[in-house]
Image: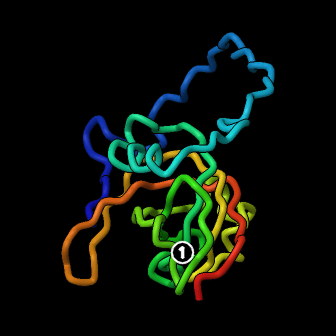
Amino acid sequence: MASITPGPGNTGPSSAPAPSPTTAEPIPTPSPTQSEPACSKFEKMSDREFKLLAKNPYEHLGKCYRIYGYVTQADSATGSLSVRANACGEKHQPTYGFISDCDTNSFFTELGGGDGESGIDNIVDGDAFEADVEVGVPYTYTTTLGGQMTAPKFHLHKITKYATTK
């Protein structure tokens, strides 16, 4: 490790002149303002409108919707605050262990501090759900076969189980 040794013109750190005090104008503190939540209303949509959203999520970035689906993966790979699900715009009841008209692979993650406040901590694989979401940037992940998959990503405000597919 290199060290500083005093030499001509360098007598070590103690020889540096002390900084002179300056007076500065105080920086005004902005008054707190009441900001409106990003999503105060969640729009409903048809299955077709949902498929159009999934086709181009960037066009819907930051918009808020009520959507439906069923969880296809909720494990240590997705983490405790995220799930992978097949999603759609309309509420369908499960038949024979799945919801046939709800087939858009999607990724859901809790918005905010990660405290499970959205209800995601009570959602497991096979649950059919209703969710209030904000559209996020699409999520790309590596599949078990090594390929890449991109899916719409939704930030959860609230998720509620209404049925089970298992």
Q: Quadrant of the C terminus?
A: bottom right
Query: Based on the displayed image, in which of its 4 quarters is residue 149 positioned?
Result: bottom left
Q: Is residue 30 left or right of residue 53?
A: right
Q: Check disc 1 and report its element: helix, strand or loop.
A: strand
Q: Is residue 80 above or below residue 69?
A: below
Q: Is residue 53 left or right of residue 90?
A: left
Q: Nearer the viewer, residue 57 or 91?
A: 91
At 71% from the left and 77% from the top, the residue drawn is 122
Residue receiving disc 1: 71
At 67% from the left and 57% from the top, the residue drawn is 113
Q: Looking at the image, which residue sits at the far bottom?
A: 166
Q: Is residue 156 left or right of residue 146?
A: right
Q: Is residue 98 above or below residue 47?
A: below
Query: Based on the displayed image, in which of its 4 quarters is residue 38 positioned?
Result: top right
Q: Quadrant of the N terminus?
A: bottom left
Residue 91 percent location from the top left of the image: 62, 60
At 53% from the left and 80% from the top, the residue drawn is 74
